[in-house]
Image (spheres, rainbow, N blue to C red):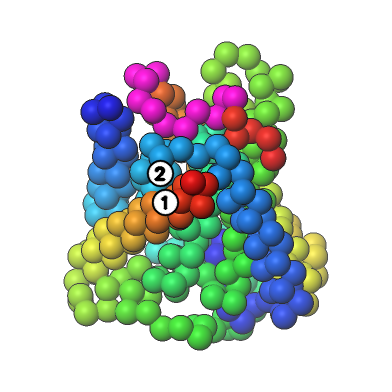
């Protein structure tokens, strides 16, 4: 759901860019506290993985495709702040190198996919721990699903604020399609997170977010 | 320590394999937002923006073959994102010191 240039009006561009800049500053501040030297390559490869996985569009329904977003997977692996930074680095290069998502709309795209999506996933993971016991596959699935749907809701809101369409007119189809894409997101998130868990279990040092990094 | 290095190298390899082998077979149907903008008839409002990249649309402009064009763009992007994110991590750690 990378918004191209030409869609959003100046006020929406400015507000979302400011919100994103503020959120990324906060993310960077937390990262200073929780990140260690050894985490740097891990964050780099997770970002690279998300970029690669985002390239693989899968068909979802009559004439529409979707792709993995990765915000929930990153949130599970490294917490919402580092997930925000990683998502932002993916979005910045997609915009600059591949012209996927507009340069002026970069703030909006970062807001939807690098702020809203990880924060949604974080709260979904947190609350679902109370609902489900054990390995919490259901919670991870829901975090993946909800992160995509929440991002699509904000994306619709921005299109509405820019005067492109009525709120219902844009929100309903966006949410319907992304609820379906979200199922793919949930399944891939569960699969990748299980792998991340296995990596942790063999004591390979990733970023441990069990104690730190989980305070927004 | 050796184990740690191995794990992130494996994740990077997995990313490169996805970019090189899977991305050329990705669905080219419009994504959710593109589809909705077509339905709302706002699609033509999208402009190419103020920058122009030789790698636009996940293709390398001077490689004609569809498969290789996308595969190499994927490899390039994966490595670029790794380097960029690694650089951000370095910067953050440096500020910390």
Q: How many marks?
A: 2
Residue B90's tag is: 1
Q: Residue at x 41, y 83 (%)?
A: B52
Q: Residue at x 40, y 71 (%)?
A: A98
Tags 1 and 2 in contact by the CB under 8 Å rule?
yes
According to the picture, the residue beneath numbered tag 2 turns out to be A40
Residue bounds of the magenta highlight: A201-211
Q: Is residue B39 above or below residue A182?
A: below
Residue A77's tag is: none
Q: Is residue A155 above or below residue B3?
A: below
Q: Residue at x 59, y 60 (%)?
A: A110
Nearest-to-viewer mark from 1 and 2: 1
Q: CA distance from mark 1 to mark 2?
A: 7 Å
Q: Quadrant of the N terminus of chain A?
A: bottom right
Q: Secondary structure at mark 2?
A: helix
Residue A76 locus on image (x, y percent) = 54, 34
């Amino acid at each position: 759901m990378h918004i191209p240039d030409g869609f959003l009006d100046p006020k929406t561009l400015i507000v979302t860019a400011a919100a994103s800049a503020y959120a990324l500053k906060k993310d960077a501040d937390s990262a200073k506290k929780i990140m260690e030297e050894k985490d740097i390559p891990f964050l780099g490869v997770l970002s690279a993985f998300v970029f690669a996985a985002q390239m693989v569009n899968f068909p979802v329904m009559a004439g529409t495709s979707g792709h993995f977003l990765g915000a929930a997977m990153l949130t599970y692996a490294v917490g919402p702040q580092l997930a925000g930074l990683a998502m932002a680095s993916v979005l910045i290069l997609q915009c600059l190198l591949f012209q996927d998502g507009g340069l002026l709309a970069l703030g909006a795209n970062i807001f939807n996919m690098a702020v809203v999506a990880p924060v949604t996933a974080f709260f979904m993971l947190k609350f679902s721990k109370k609902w489900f016991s054990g390995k919490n596959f259901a919670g991870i699935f829901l975090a993946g699903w909800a992160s995509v749907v929440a991002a699509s809701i904000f994306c619709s809101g921005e299109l509405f604020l820019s005067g492109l369409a009525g709120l219902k007119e844009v929100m309903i189809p966006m949410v319907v399609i992304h609820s379906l894409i979200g199922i793919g997101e949930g399944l891939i998130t569960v699969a990748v997170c299980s792998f991340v868990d296995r990596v942790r279990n063999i004591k390979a040092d990733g970023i441990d977010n069990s104690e730190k990094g989980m305070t927004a | 320590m050796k184990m740690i290095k191995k794990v992130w190298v494996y994740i990077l390899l997995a990313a490169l394999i996805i970019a090189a082998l899977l991305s050329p077979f990705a669905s080219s149907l419009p994504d959710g937002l593109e589809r909705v903008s077509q339905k709302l008839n706002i699609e033509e409002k999208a402009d190419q923006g103020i920058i122009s990249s030789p790698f636009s649309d996940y293709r390398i402009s001077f490689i004609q073959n569809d498969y290789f064009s996308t595969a190499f763009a994927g490899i390039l992007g994966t490595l670029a994102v790794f380097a960029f994110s690694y650089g951000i991590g370095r910067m953050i750690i440096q500020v910390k010191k």
